[in-house]
Image (cartoon, helix red, strand yellow):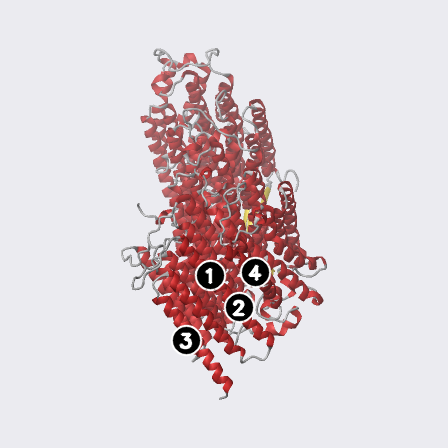
């Protein structure tokens, strides 16, 4: 019975993947892709990975979807010829086909090999969980055992925002806020905003004991910001470059500082003192949540200004 | 096989049925406005029935309240989005369809 | 076959479709979608395959995938900004070498 | 404070990024240079620590591998860290004068993230951490390419981004398969359990393809010339000198740690064939370019080919010859970093003088800026592999290794590549010697710009005399199979 | 290390540092640059004299630096090294003087003198190289530093000549590189003179040894302009006169010839090379080149082209001499290295003087120049007579030793080569001398400058006179202890009696 569900999910997944890549209309393509994100989060549930399911729904389907749709609206003006799928005369088609089948064959062979992992890393996680300061293993891995990865990953996020800033049109003229002039929307979102904020903080708090954490919370926060922006509430803060940048690095700064203090005490980088590990992790996560929310929101905001074309840019 | 289980099953099945009807409406109805109608109404009711069915099975009041909260939020959200879609369709002057007439599918993005 | 392994195979399929689309398409947005499919496929393989080896949930690959998803979002957002700027400047959503003779 | 120097390699660049994003214009530059000095000192102290205690590991967060991530300081990591410190600080000095205020404002954070990513890659011994480092590096590099904001560089950045993303995914696929097979991400631990099964072979295949795509190895190179040739000059220097080295470094690490030369001779051959094709194709294309920076960018393609020749020359049979090849390859990498950065900077000055990108516009410049041409020439000597230079020493060792193993094909390829590179470099040179009618109208670059270019070129020559300092850091056990 | 121990390094550094400083001087500082150049040249001669005294006392100062595992950069002053180093340092001084005069009022002097000094530094490096690897390094450096001099004028013609020059010398360099690499891979890191290991290697793998010999000599032969690798030399004549003098008399061709000597005597050992039959083909090739060069010289109408082909021919005398088994022939070859340098540089100086003063480039324009420029013409005459081999000019000594050496080695046919080439030499030089001294001037000079001087500017004239005087002195005082001949004998004694 369970396998039937799994197989159905896989079929839907692959079907949606095919559709999202090979539909004629780009709009549908994006829609199928968002749908695929939702199905994926079901798949993650089936894989006993609720954390990833949350993240996939919030980040993968949510934020990526918003960004894609927003981009789509601005790409309308481009010369868009629908793809001709069976270009049998094009070497590119055959190259793609060859690579695709090659990848499937190679991976399929590799996956079908029976496995017996030599190192029992999962046991090591549960053995050391008590010392990590949190009880949820994934948070322990992300913010303690492998916190160095997370540190670099936050840097990656800041970088993405920075590229968006680089391509911003000009420093003087912030983009006009094209919000929806709908009264009902306005009213409802005012109601929703605190609730979304609350959910975000709850996800952050829950992260130390159960699925949740900074990234999911940050993504939810970002969606709150985006809604905030869409109804035309105050976003002047986001137009000021200094606030933008300082908001991005807030989390990273806390992370680096907390990580660097042990160096002065003769400990390796990113070591938390045993007694305060939980508090420190929560502190870092709080910083990260705010920064991630802010970064994802600025990506949305800045990518809008990347699309506008001004006369002074003509070469 | 007590009464509770029978009630639960009934609620679940009718909830699922509601979803099916809503989806059928989405496919069969001729224009944007009627489709929204099918989607939002049926979904709210269907979700409500399912939430009710689940509440019957729960001991903790907090959890039950959470489920109800979800239902409430979804209702507000679907009402709002239904309103927005209809409003936007109206802004774009998409006409209502007369019975028997079918709207050209929403293919505006297909150049 | 455990359900973990089924999803690992699903990941293989996603990767194959992703690679095919990535090479085939010249429209940058489609290519980006293909990249995301490829990424999702990889994540499925990572979690599905290692959990099928251990026969139980393994938190390490799950944590890695969380990191991976965030990195993928960052990359996608960055690519979108570039694509939008490119499209605004040139009125094209494809790279010059893919625009054909027209 | 034994933990300080190694953590400093990561903390200082990240601090630099934070500072350059948070502070105002004046403090940004001042703090950046203070941090650059700190990093240079930090590298030196790490070197002394290495002299004192040899290869050592550092567990991040006090969680030792395989649960945590361990950084490893060995000779190879140290050489690359020192190399990036040298090149990056000189490029920063150059950029500080060369770039406009707006560009510089954005340059600093990218630069710092780039450096952080490089250091994290040199030190890391964890497969997934390497992936994150690679992504950080690629995105920083893409951002730097897009810094000039015109359509051409945007296209280059997009091309680069897609190639880099595809490459990273390839690498990650490999990591996924390896983790599933061995249950660990730590490279030293993996090497203890490694055996070349089908799934590990597939995994390594994906990893190598991905990484080589990021290194722009023929035939996956087409993104490189526009990106490196079209970027702002200090950016081109950083990209060509350092960024492509990072992914190659990981291939080299994997190959030597997992002793792949024992596992498969044909894989080595394949790498060698790709490398040879890159050498000849890159050289030929460089010879046919009309834009100066494209010549240099194609030359990078060819040089990458030389690095690839390490792999067929690592042999399980002849430990001495393998060691020679390894040393030669490392010298080539190092010499190329110094010389190519110097060459890009010198070329940037020349283009600044003439205000055009064309080779023809160089006519008369050797008279107007002899020192700069000298800098270009010195870098060229190392690129051509003529003595005395680091490039020559590297080639010499590769040739020796190939001769000792009677692999004459590679000798022939190296020789042909050298002749090709001599041809394209002297071609540029001869353009600067041209005299044309109509008088000169050149702009004069600031003295700092010329001296920074010269300093890197001179270093690439001095490397030819001081190779032993570098090679002494590489223990024989680094390559000889256990 | 003591000052004397480091002497080889100082000798190298005098011109190298001069080059660096000159590059950095602004173009306008002509006075400072010239002073610096001359001071460096004089200091270098002083250091060389010190070194020669040390070497004469059976010492061999050596500086070495390990730059790669099992691979050292060695600077070593042995007797043979000092022969070439002495020649280079004397001619550097003369050529610098000449170049200062020649390039007066022309642009790009900073660049010119910088590369010029660098070129001399590499020549010094070649002469002091203590092993094949060091030799290779400076050999390639020489290629690099002479290229800018060849293309100095920046005309399409000179750029084309530069390309030809590079194509030849870089290919030669690569061949040499392969040879040296093979040597190091299979024989080892050996200093010059340690020939015993090579002998063992030759016994075990004669084919590899032959290939190494072929590659080494092939690489050197390009710079030594042996037939058929001589094509670059006449083309490179577009360079300014001091460069031609430098290329032909001192640096490039001599570096090739010197390299051949090193390979035959100090890498393989002359006995081994003879036993293996490596040398005879080389002497045949040299003989052919001697005749071929002379024959081609006869057909040239351009003065510098004729001199260039004459060089092709004369350098092969050196090669021929050292391929003769037996001390006497070797003395002839070695001493010709020096004699030919002195004489040929004189000729090129004079050719440059004619071109600069009167605008004369072709031979038929030389009519009557003896009266307009008597001193230059006298120097030219001495050089030409020396080339033909007429006593007491130095060329005679070389040919005498070559001839007797050939007889001693039992290679009588060499005599005929010598006679034939001398006749050809006479045939292409005597008519020139006849035009200079005995034919009247034909109309106006093509382009007359320096009208205020009876002959030509002193800075152009004096170096030519000095080298002419030296070439006569080398012949006249050949018997004295200080002559090149005695030094060549010293070398040969040390080579044959280790």
The chain under label 1 reads: B
The answer to whether residue B8 is above or below residue E212 is below
- Callouts 3 and 2 on one subunit: yes
Q: Residues within 10 Å of mark 1 (few under 14, many from 20)?
A: some
Q: Pointer 3: residues within 10 angstroms few (<14), some, or many (20+)?
A: some
Q: Is residue A92 left or right of residue D309?
A: left
**Tag 2, which secondary structure?**
helix
Q: Of the residues under marks 2 and 1, which one precedes in the sequence?
A: 2
Are the residues flagged by discs 4 and 3 from a single subunit? no
- Left or right of A279: which side holds D425? left
Q: Which mark is residue B50?
A: none
Q: Which mark is residue B72?
A: 2
Q: How many marks?
A: 4
Alpha carbons under labels 1 and 3: distance apart? 23 Å
Question: Crowding at label 2, few (<14), some or many (≥20) Cα neighbours within 10 Å?
Answer: some
Question: Which label sits on residue A191?
Answer: 4
Q: Most extreme residue toward the left, as rendered?
A: A89
Residue for badge 1: B81
Front position in the image: D106 or D417: D106
**Looking at the rendered structure, which numbered label has been put on residue B17?**
3
Residue D213, horizontal then vertical, whole percent: 44, 55
**Marks 2 & 1 on one chain:** yes
Q: State how far apart marks 4 and 3 are (Cα).
A: 32 Å
The correct choice, above or below, for E116 with respect to C48 in the image is above
CA distance separating discs 3 and 2:
20 Å
Do callouts 4 and 2 point to residues on the same chain?
no
Q: At numbered mark 1, what does the secondary structure look like: helix, strand or loop?
A: helix
Q: Are dots 2 and 1 in contact, CB under 8 Å? A: no
Distance from the alpha carbon under mark 2 to that under mark 1:
14 Å
Residue B56 x/y as whole percent: 53, 80
B1 horizontally vs A15: left or right: right
Query: Vertically, is A8 above or below A144?
Result: below
């Amino acid at each position: 019975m369970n396998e039937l569900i799994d197989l159905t999910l896989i079929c839907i997944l692959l079907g949606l993947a095919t559709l999202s890549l090979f539909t004629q209309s780009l709009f549908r393509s994006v829609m199928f892709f968002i749908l695929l994100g939702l199905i994926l989060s079901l798949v993650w549930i089936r894989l006993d990975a609720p954390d990833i399911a949350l993240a996939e729904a919030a980040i993968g389907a949510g934020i990526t979807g918003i960004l894609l749709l927003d981009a789509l609206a601005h790409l309308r003006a481009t010369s868009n010829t629908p793809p001709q799928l069976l270009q049998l005369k094009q070497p590119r088609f055959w190259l793609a086909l060859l690579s695709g089948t090659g990848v499937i064959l190679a991976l399929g062979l590799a996956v079908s090999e029976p496995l017996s992992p030599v190192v029992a890393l999962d046991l090591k996680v549960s053995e050391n969980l008590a010392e990590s300061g949190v009880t949820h293993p994934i948070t322990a891995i992300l913010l303690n055992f492998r916190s160095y990865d997370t540190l670099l990953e936050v840097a990656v996020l800041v970088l993405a925002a920075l590229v968006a800033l680089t391509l911003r049109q000009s420093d003087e003229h912030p983009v006009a806020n094209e919000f929806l002039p709908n009264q009902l929307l306005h009213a409802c979102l005012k109601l929703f905003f605190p609730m979304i904020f609350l959910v975000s903080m709850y996800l952050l708090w829950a992260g130390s004991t159960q699925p949740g954490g900074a990234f999911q919370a940050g993504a939810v926060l970002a969606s709150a910001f985006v809604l905030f922006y869409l109804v035309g509430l105050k976003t002047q803060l986001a137009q000021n470059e200094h606030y933008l940048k300082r908001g991005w690095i807030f989390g990273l700064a806390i992370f680096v500082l907390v990580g660097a203090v042990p160096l002065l005490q003769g400990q390796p980088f990113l070591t938390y003192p045993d007694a305060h590990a939980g508090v420190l992790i929560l502190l870092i996560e709080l910083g990260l949540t705010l920064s991630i929310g802010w970064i994802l929101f600025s990506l949305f905001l800045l990518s809008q200004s990347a699309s506008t074309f001004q006369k002074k840019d003509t070469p | 096989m007590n009464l509770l289980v029978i009630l639960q099953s009934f609620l679940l099945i009718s909830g699922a049925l509601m979803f099916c009807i809503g989806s059928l409406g989405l496919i069969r109805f001729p224009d944007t406005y009627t489709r929204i109608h099918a989607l939002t109404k049926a979904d709210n009711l269907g979700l409500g029935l399912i939430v009710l069915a689940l509440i019957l099975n729960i001991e903790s009041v907090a959890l039950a309240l959470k489920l109800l909260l979800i239902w409430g939020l979804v209702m507000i959200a679907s009402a709002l989005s239904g309103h927005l879609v209809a409003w936007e369709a109206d802004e774009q002057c998409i006409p209502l369809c007369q019975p028997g007439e079918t709207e050209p599918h929403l293919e505006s993005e297909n150049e | 076959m455990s359900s973990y392994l089924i999803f690992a195979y699903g990941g293989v399929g996603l990767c194959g479709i992703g690679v095919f689309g990535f090479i085939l398409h010249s429209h940058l947005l489609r290519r980006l979608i293909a990249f995301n499919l490829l990424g999702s496929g990889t994540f499925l393989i990572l979690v599905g395959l290692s959990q099928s080896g251990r026969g139980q949930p393994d938190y390490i690959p799950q944590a890695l995938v969380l990191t991976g998803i965030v990195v993928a979002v960052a990359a996608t957002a960055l690519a979108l900004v570039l694509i939008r700027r490119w499209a605004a400047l040139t009125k094209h959503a494809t790279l010059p070498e893919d625009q054909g003779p027209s | 404070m034994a933990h300080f120097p190694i953590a400093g390699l990561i903390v200082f660049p990240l601090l630099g990024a934070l500072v350059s994003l948070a502070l105002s214009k004046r403090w940004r530059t001042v703090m950046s240079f203070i941090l650059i000095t700190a990093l240079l000192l930090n590298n030196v102290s790490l070197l002394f620590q290495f002299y004192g205690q040899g290869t050592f590991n550092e567990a991040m967060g006090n969680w030792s591998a395989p649960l945590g991530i361990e950084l490893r300081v060995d000779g190879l990591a140290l050489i690359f860290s020192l190399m990036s410190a040298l090149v990056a600080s000189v490029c920063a000095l150059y950029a500080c004068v060369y770039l406009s205020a707006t560009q510089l404002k954005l340059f600093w954070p990218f630069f710092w993230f780039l450096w952080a990513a490089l250091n994290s890659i040199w030190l890391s011994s964890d497969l997934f951490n390497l992936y994150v480092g690679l992504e950080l590096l690629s995105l920083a590099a893409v951002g730097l390419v897009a810094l000039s904001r015109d359509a051409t560089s945007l296209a280059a950045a997009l091309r680069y981004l897609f190639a880099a993303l595809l490459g990273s995914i390839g690498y990650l696929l490999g990591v996924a398969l390896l983790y599933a097979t061995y249950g660990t991400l730590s490279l030293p631990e993996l090497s203890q359990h490694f055996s070349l099964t089908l799934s590990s072979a597939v995994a390594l295949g994906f990893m190598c393809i991905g990484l080589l795509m990021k290194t722009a190895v023929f035939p996956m190179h087409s993104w490189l010339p526009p990106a490196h040739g079209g970027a702002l000059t200090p950016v081109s220097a950083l990209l060509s000198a350092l960024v492509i080295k990072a992914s190659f470094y990981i291939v080299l690490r994997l190959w030597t740690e997992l002793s792949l030369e024992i596992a498969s001779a044909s894989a080595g051959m394949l790498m060698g064939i790709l490398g040879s094709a890159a050498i000849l194709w890159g050289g030929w294309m460089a010879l046919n370019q009309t834009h100066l920076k494209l010549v240099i960018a194609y030359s990078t393609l060819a040089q990458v080919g030389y690095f690839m020749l390490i792999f067929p020359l690592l042999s399980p049979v002849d430990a001495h010859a393998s060691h020679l090849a390894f040393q030669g390859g490392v010298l080539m990498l190092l010499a190329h970093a110094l010389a190519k950065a110097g060459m890009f900077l010198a070329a940037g000055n020349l283009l600044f003088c003439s205000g055009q990108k064309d080779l023809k516009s160089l006519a008369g410049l050797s008279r107007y800026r002899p020192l700069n041409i000298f800098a270009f020439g010195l870098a060229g000597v190392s690129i051509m592999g003529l003595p005395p230079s680091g490039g020559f020493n590297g080639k010499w060792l590769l040739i020796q290794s190939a001769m000792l193993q009677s692999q004459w094909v590679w000798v022939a390829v190296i020789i042909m590549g050298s002749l090709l590179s001599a041809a394209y470099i002297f071609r540029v040179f001869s353009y600067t010697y041209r005299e044309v009618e109509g008088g000169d109208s050149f702009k004069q670059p600031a003295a700092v710009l010329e001296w920074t270019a010269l300093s890197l070129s001179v270093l690439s020559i001095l490397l030819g005399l001081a190779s032993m300092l570098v090679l002494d850091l590489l223990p024989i056990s680094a390559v000889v199979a256990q | 290390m003591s000052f004397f121990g480091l002497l080889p390094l100082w000798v190298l550094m005098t011109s190298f540092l001069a080059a660096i400083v000159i590059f950095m001087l602004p173009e306008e500082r002509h006075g400072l640059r010239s002073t610096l150049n001359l001071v460096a040249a004089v200091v270098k001669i002083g250091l060389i004299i010190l070194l020669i005294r040390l070497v004469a006392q059976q010492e061999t100062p050596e500086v070495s630096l390990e730059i790669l595992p099992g691979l050292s950069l060695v600077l070593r002053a042995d007797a043979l090294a000092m022969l070439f180093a002495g020649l280079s340092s004397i001619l550097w001084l003369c050529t610098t003087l000449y170049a200062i005069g020649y390039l007066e009022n022309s642009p790009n002097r900073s660049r010119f003198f910088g590369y010029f000094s660098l070129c001399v530094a590499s020549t010094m490096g070649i002469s002091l190289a203590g092993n094949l690897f060091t030799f290779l390094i400076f050999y390639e450096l020489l290629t690099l530093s002479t290229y800018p001099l060849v293309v100095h004028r920046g005309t399409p013609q000179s750029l084309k000549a530069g390309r030809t020059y590079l194509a030849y010398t870089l290919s030669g360099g690569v061949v040499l590189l392969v040879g040296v690499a093979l040597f190091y891979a299979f024989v080892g890191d050996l200093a010059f003179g340690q020939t015993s290991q090579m002998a063992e290697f030759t016994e075990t793998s004669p084919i590899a040894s032959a290939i190494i010999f072929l590659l080494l000599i092939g690489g050197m032969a390009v710079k030594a302009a042996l037939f058929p690798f001589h094509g670059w030399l006449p083309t490179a004549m577009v360079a300014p006169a001091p460069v031609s003098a430098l290329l032909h008399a001192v640096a490039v061709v001599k570096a090739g010839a010197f390299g051949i000597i090193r390979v035959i005597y100090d890498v393989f050992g002359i006995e081994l090379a003879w036993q293996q039959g490596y040398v005879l083909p080389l002497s045949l090739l040299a003989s052919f080149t001697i005749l071929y060069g002379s024959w081609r010289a006869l057909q040239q109408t351009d003065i510098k082209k004729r001199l260039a082909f004459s060089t092709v021919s004369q350098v092969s005398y050196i090669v021929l001499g050292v391929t003769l088994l037996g001390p006497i022939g070797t003395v002839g070859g070695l001493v010709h290295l020096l004699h030919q340098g002195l004489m040929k540089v004189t000729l090129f100086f004079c050719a440059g003087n004619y071109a600069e003063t009167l605008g004369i480039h072709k031979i038929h324009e030389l009519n009557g120049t003896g009266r307009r420029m008597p001193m230059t013409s006298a120097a030219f005459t001495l050089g030409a007579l020396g080339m033909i081999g007429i006593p007491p000019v130095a060329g005679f000594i070389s040919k005498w030793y070559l001839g007797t050496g050939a007889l001693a080695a039992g290679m009588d046919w060499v005599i005929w080569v010598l006679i034939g080439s001398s006749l050809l030499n006479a045939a292409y030089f005597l008519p020139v001398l006849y035009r200079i001294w005995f034919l009247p001037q034909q109309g106006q000079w093509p382009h007359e400058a320096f009208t205020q001087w009876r002959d030509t500017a002193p800075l152009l004239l004096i170096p030519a006179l000095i080298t002419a005087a030296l070439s006569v002195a080398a012949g006249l005082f050949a018997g004295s202890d200080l002559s090149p001949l005695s030094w060549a004998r010293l070398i040969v004694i040390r080579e044959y009696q280790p």
